[in-house]
Image (cartoon, helix red, strand yellow):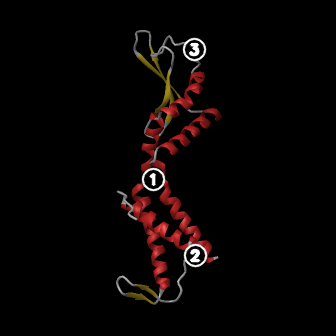
Amino acid sequence: MAYNDNNPERRNLTVTSLSIIIFYLAGGTFVSNEVRLEVINVKFSKPEVLAVTVWIMLFWFCYRYWQLNQGTWKSEFFKNLVEDSVANKIIYGHLVSKYSLAADYTKSYYPNKHWVKLSHQGPQKIVFQHLYKGNNESQLSEVKEIIGFKSNFLIFLCCIWVCLRHPILATYFVPYILFLTAVILGVLSRL
């Protein structure tokens, strides 16, 4: 099975974690103090050194992955959240009531819809935004902070949607989840 990944740190962490997980879940053990690799005619008489080496490699791969990828998911996630049409549909009704717009479309750019949406304010801050026509047909904007239970809950739902629809969080967090699973299985096997 080929595993193609353009991020070598993520690939190393994922493959090593999966190897350890499979070893423990499949009930892997060393049957004797001797380990042989038939392919290259090598024999190891101290398998505990191999086990320690695998664990050191696992922690090294996790450290390198964290070091090179920390926070890389944030900007892409916020971009997906702001641009996703379904996320904006989820929040639309709430924004119409938050801006007290109701069915008054006189300042709207659309005949039957208000231009309200999620928007960036800074690199990692999301706000509500209402775009509308001014008196001389110029574009005006009103921004509101995301405050209150209902607003935060709807943002949470939008985040869940974006997580399911776009792969950015999965590609960032799954290697950490696999790493933690491997470590937990290793600890539980020693208890």
Name the disc covering residue 161, or none.
Answer: none
Q: CA distance from mark 1 to mark 3?
A: 42 Å
The amino acid on which the numbered mark 2 sits, given as a three-letter code, is Gly
The label nearer to you, 2 versus 1, is 2
Reading the chain from its start, which is encountered first: label 2 or label 1?
Answer: 2
Q: CA distance from mark 2 to mark 3?
A: 64 Å
Instruction: Tell me the element at label 3.
Output: loop
The amino acid on which the numbered mark 1 sits, given as a three-letter code, is Thr
Q: Quadrant of residue 1?
A: bottom left
Expressed as whole percent of the image width and height from the top left, the position of residue 135 reads: 44, 9
Along the line of sight, the residue nearer the viewer: 40 or 155: 40
Q: Which residue is mark 1?
A: 171
Expressed as whole percent of the image width and height from the top left, the position of residue 43 reads: 41, 88
The label nearer to you, 2 versus 3, is 2
Reading the chain from its start, which is encountered first: label 1 or label 3?
Answer: 3
The amino acid on which the numbered mark 3 sits, given as a three-letter code, is Ala
Q: Is residue 39 above or below residue 74?
A: below
Q: Which residue is mark 2?
A: 27
Residue 35 placement, left or right of 102? left
Q: Quadrant of residue 8?
A: bottom left
Q: Is residue 100 above or below residue 181?
A: above
Quarter containing the C terminus: bottom right
Which residue is rendered at x = 65% and y = 35% of the image? Answer: 149
Q: Is residue 114 above or below residue 33?
A: above
- Crowding around mark 1 (Cα neighbors within 10 Å: few <14, some 14 to 19, many 20+) is few
Whether residues under marks 2 and 3 lie with C-beta atoms below 8 angstroms apart, the answer is no
- Crowding around mark 3 (Cα neighbors within 10 Å: few <14, some 14 to 19, many 20+) is few
- Crowding around mark 2 (Cα neighbors within 10 Å: few <14, some 14 to 19, many 20+) is few
Q: Which residue is mark 3?
A: 103
Expressed as whole percent of the image width and height from the top left, the position of residue 72 reads: 42, 50
Instruction: Tell me the element at label 2.
Output: loop
